[in-house]
Image (spheres, grey):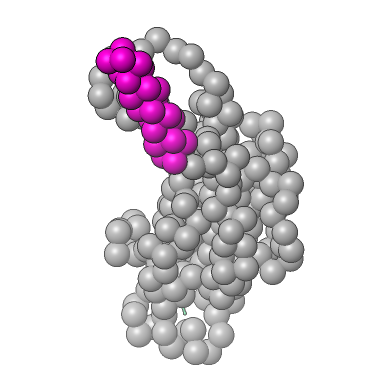
């Protein structure tokens, strides 16, 4: 299992989050490359992608947006996990999601998107950024939740290790409809890593079954 962790970062805070995610994945026996988005040419050889960006004026940074545009098809073929590093001074809210969150989630078929607190360091800001930060009265602070970030990386590793068996598993029948939903979702997601469309496969199987039933009924009535 080889995973690409890539993040667009202007002042280094998001890049450090990417490094920590990569480090935790490695402790979970996952092979990891941590690279800036502009350095990634192809996704061939990666089983999954973790993609993040700092948020500025409500948007992801350009290298992350361009990465999605450049690798749209390849991203859809593998599990993708998104993160944003943004709010400082208060815990992240739904409204802190960057403007392109919905589009990027839909384009990549992302499994998850987390918004983590960010870091604003006074010594790194340019003159225009200092004015913006003063106007919106954002505090200069480091609100990156390292434990939460490490837990999320472990969740990703668990998800990926459960991925393949989901296709082959023969387990006792689910006890509730909700449990059945969970199992079906795992199979659909695992199928996608092979480029298969689980819904189409099921429809095709039902069509064949219906043909067989019709053929059997026809032969009975003769
Ligand atoms: C000029 C400026 C604008 C920002 N705008 C936002 C914003 O709209 N939403 C947000 O959640 N965070 C905003 N932030 C906070 C950054 O996203 C946060 O500090 C992030 O961790 C920076 O990541 P980086 O160091 O990787 O570039 C802004 C920070 C600066 C300096």
Magenta run includes residue 211: yes
Magenta run includes residue 78: no
In the picture, measured across the screen, residue 145 lies left or right of residue 95, that is: right
Q: Magenta part of the protein: which range?
A: 199-222
Looking at the image, the residue that sits furthest to the front is 222
* On screen, residue 213 above or below 147: above
Dominant SS of magenta comes to helix
Instruction: Say which residue appears at 55% left-offset and 31% top-offset.
Output: 163
Instruction: Say which residue appears at 49% left-offset and 89% top-offset.
Output: 128
In the picture, measured across the screen, residue 68 lies left or right of residue 26, that is: left
Task: Out of 196 and 134, give the one closest to the viewer.
Answer: 196
Residue 49 seen from this side: yes
In the picture, measured across the screen, residue 179 lies left or right of residue 47, that is: left
In the picture, measured across the screen, residue 216 lies left or right of residue 46, that is: left
* Image quarter (top left, top right, bottom left or bottom right) of the N terminus: top right
Q: How many marks?
A: 0
* On screen, residue 82 above or below 166: below
Q: Position of residue 214 (x, y in %)?
A: 33, 24
* Image quarter (top left, top right, bottom left or bottom right) of the C terminus: top left
Instruction: Say which residue appears at 74% left-offset and 46% top-offset.
Output: 45
Q: Position of residue 52 (x, y in %)?
A: 54, 59
Instruction: Say which residue appears at 39% left-offset and 36% top-offset.
Output: 203
Q: Position of residue 50 (x, y in %)?
A: 58, 51
Q: Position of residue 28 (x, y in %)?
A: 64, 31
Task: Out of 99 and 191, give the one closest to the viewer.
Answer: 191
Residue 50 seen from this side: no
């Amino acid at each position: 299992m080889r995973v690409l962790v890539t993040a667009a970062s202007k002042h280094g805070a998001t890049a450090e989050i990417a490094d920590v995610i990569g480090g935790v994945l490695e402790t979970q026996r996952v092979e990891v490359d941590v690279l800036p988005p502009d350095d990634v040419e192809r996704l061939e050889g990666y089983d999954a992608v973790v993609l993040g960006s700092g948020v500025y004026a409500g948007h992801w940074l350009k290298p992350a947006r361009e990465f999605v545009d450049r690798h749209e098809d390849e991203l859809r073929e593998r599990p993708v996990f998104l993160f944003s590093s943004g709010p400082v001074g208060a815990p992240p809210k739904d409204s802190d999601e960057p403007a392109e969150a919905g589009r990027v989630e839909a384009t990549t078929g992302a499994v998850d998107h987390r918004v983590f607190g960010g870091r604003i360091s006074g010594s790194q800001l340019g003159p225009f950024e200092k004015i913006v930060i003063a106007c919106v009265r954002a505090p200069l602070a480091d609100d990156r939740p390292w434990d939460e970030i490490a837990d999320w990386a472990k969740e990703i590793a668990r998800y990926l290790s459960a991925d393949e068996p989901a296709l082959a598993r023969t387990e006792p029948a689910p006890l509730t409809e909700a449990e059945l939903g969970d199992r079906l979702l795992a199979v659909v997601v695992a199928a996608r890593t092979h480029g298969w469309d689980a819904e189409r496969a099921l429809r095709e199987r039902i069509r064949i079954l219906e043909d067989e039933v019709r053929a059997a009924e026809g032969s009975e009535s003769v």
